[in-house]
Image: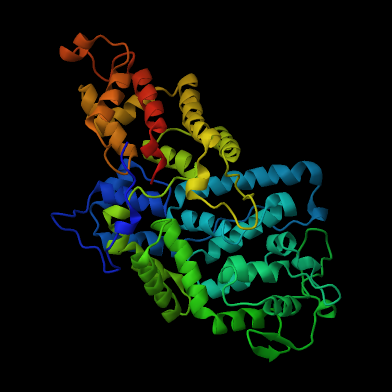
């Protein structure tokens, strides 16, 4: 097994990456981008990116994501309970529809999908708490349109999202009975980090300023501001005193704690996109990104471009140091094989990713999934193997086994050499080559299966052989069990 690269060895800066003969622009680097900024890519997409410079490629991904229109609303997207003809039956059915649409977006949208999913684990809500399909859509829509926008305005918008108002008890926060849940999480999890630059009094006073969003004329309908439940008394937040309301809290927070917010958010993004471990160099990189964010009044696109174009992001020590999430495992495999899938397959994958720890729209708690090493234990690891096994078996049992050979032929130019085919397929799914030649030999023996050795020696066997689909399938299952397959 390849040793995971030590992220503390990444001494590269945020200067733009410029290809050289020693450090070329190649499919290896393009796959690194697609695995981190999306959920993988087909070989055609990778080949197309080779014709662009690194800067052009990153611009295309970031600008494309920023300018992408939101997913259209379903007809039920703004229903209240009264609008359903059969709420008990339709509500969960609509949620399942939207959950499926969300996964399709993740497959198709590259960076916008990746960031939308990232922010769903930052500004956390849980469907199991608010349990209303239209709120799930509205929450997703709010995150989608702000995913690469202005972080200050993102923070302003998410606090008034119905799913968030219900999940963190904003609808219960009145001048008669203040509820501090959202104010606390806004500082602790969403903007500043635990214990960083705020006091209990700031939470208490901010909660008073956030009161009033309690008018709910229709159950699970639009939530309105009610001046009668708003605390219009004087509050002091971060040393600023006045008759503050919702917008004032956001303005004061970013005015008085802007540098702390920028560092906290950039650190979280760095750990997600570059490395879960930071050293002194990493902290310096994060500080530079934070300065870029504040210099641009919290517009995120310049910060993203600075990071994703950098030598630091492309440094070999940033490759293969992040453990895939369950959705990375299955969606990367779908994209990188270009295998057939339909709604039945995606629904099954959604179900199984939930079993191994990542239930979409239902993170474990308000702090979200902690990612990286927390994804892996004895049961979830075997579950990850099963994700790929079940998908391959479904394709095989439903008449799609020929696509295994199509993949092998496309990647190897229809080679007849079992070692070359094996190594090419293994390398296709890995961030780096395997550590030893013997690792490839073991995989080759699995691929060769029970076909007599003389068939290979005499050129009798090729990828049109009757057993070839099965041989590719067992190799793919073996690849999915390699420790390196779990890394991106």
Asked if 238 appears above or below 435 in the picture, the reply is: below
**Colouring method of the image:** rainbow
Q: Residue 96, located in which quarter of the rendered image? A: top right
Q: Is residue 33 visible?
A: yes
Q: Position of residue 233 (x, y in %)?
A: 79, 87
Q: Residue 471, located in which quarter of the rendered image? A: top left
- Residue drawn at x 74%, y 46% is 91
Q: Position of residue 108 (x, y in %)?
A: 46, 48
Closer to the camera in the image, 423 or 58: 423
Q: Position of residue 419 (x, y in %)?
A: 22, 25
- Residue drawn at x 70%, y 86% is 236
Q: How many marks?
A: 0
- Residue drawn at x 30%, y 68% is 14
In the rendered structure, the answer to whether residue 59 lies left or right of residue 347 reads left
List the single residue furthest toward the left: 21
Closer to the camera in the image, 67 or 412: 412
In the rendered structure, the answer to whether residue 323 lies left or right of residue 143 reads left
Asked if 396 appears above or below 384 in the picture, the reply is: above
Which quadrant: the N terminus? top left
Q: Position of residue 216 (x, y in %)?
A: 82, 66
- Residue drawn at x 31%, y 43% is 44
Asked if 411 appears above or below 21 in the picture, the reply is: above
Closer to the camera in the image, 66 or 75: 66
Q: Is residue 77 visible?
A: no
């Amino acid at each position: 097994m390849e040793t995971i690269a030590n992220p503390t060895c990444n001494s590269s800066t945020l200067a733009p990456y410029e290809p050289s003969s020693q450090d070329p622009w190649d499919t290896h680097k393009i796959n690194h981008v697609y695995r981190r900024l999306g959920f993988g890519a087909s070989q055609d997409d990778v080949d197309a990116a080779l014709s662009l410079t690194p800067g052009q490629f990153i611009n295309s991904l970031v600008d494309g994501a920023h300018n992408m229109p939101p997913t259209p609303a379903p007809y039920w997207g703004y229903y209240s309970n009264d609008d359903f003809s059969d709420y008990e039956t339709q509500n969960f059915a609509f949620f399942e529809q939207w959950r499926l649409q969300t996964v399709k977006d993740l497959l198709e949208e590259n960076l916008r999908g990746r960031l939308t999913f990232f922010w769903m684990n930052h500004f956390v809500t849980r469907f199991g708490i608010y349990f209303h399909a239209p709120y799930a859509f509205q929450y997703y829509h709010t995150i989608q349109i702000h995913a690469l926008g202005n972080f200050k305005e993102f923070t302003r918008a998410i606090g008034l999202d119905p799913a968030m108002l219900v999940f963190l008890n904003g609808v219960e926060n009145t001048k008669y009975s203040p509820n501090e849940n959202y104010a606390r999480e806004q500082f602790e999890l969403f903007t500043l980090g635990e214990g960083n630059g705020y006091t209990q009094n700031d939470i208490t006073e901010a909660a008073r300023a956030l009161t009033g969003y309690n008018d709910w004329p229709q159950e699970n309908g639009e939530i309105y501001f009610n001046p009668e439940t708003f605390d219009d008394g004087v509050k002091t937040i971060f040393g600023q005193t006045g008759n503050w309301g919702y917008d004032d809290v956001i303005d004061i927070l970013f005015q008085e704690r802007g540098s702390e917010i920028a560092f906290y958010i950039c650190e979280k993004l760095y750990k997600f996109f570059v490395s879960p471990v930071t050293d002194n160099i990493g902290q310096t990189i994060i500080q530079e990104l934070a300065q870029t964010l504040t210099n641009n009044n919290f517009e995120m696109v310049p910060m993203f471009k600075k990071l994703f174009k950098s030598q630091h992001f492309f440094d070999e020590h940033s490759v293969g140091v992040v453990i895939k999430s369950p959705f990375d495992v299955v969606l990367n495999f779908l994209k990188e094989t270009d295998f057939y899938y339909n709604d039945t397959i995606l629904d099954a994958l959604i179900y199984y990713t939930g079993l191994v720890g990542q239930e979409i729209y239902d993170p474990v708690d308000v702090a979200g999934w902690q990612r990286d090493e927390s994804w892996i234990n004895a049961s979830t690891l075997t579950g990850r193997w099963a994700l790929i096994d079940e998908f391959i078996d479904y394709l095989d049992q439903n008449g799609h086994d020929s696509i295994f050979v199509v993949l092998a032929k496309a990647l190897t130019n229809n080679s007849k050499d079992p070692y070359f085919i094996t190594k090419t397929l293994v390398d296709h799914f890995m961030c780096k080559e395997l550590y030893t030649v013997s690792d490839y030999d073991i995989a080759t023996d699995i691929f060769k299966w029970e076909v007599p050795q003389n068939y290979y020696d005499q050129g009798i066997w090729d990828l049109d052989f009757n057993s070839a689909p099965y041989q590719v399938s067992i190799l793919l299952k073996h690849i999915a069990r390699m420790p390196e397959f779990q890394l991106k």
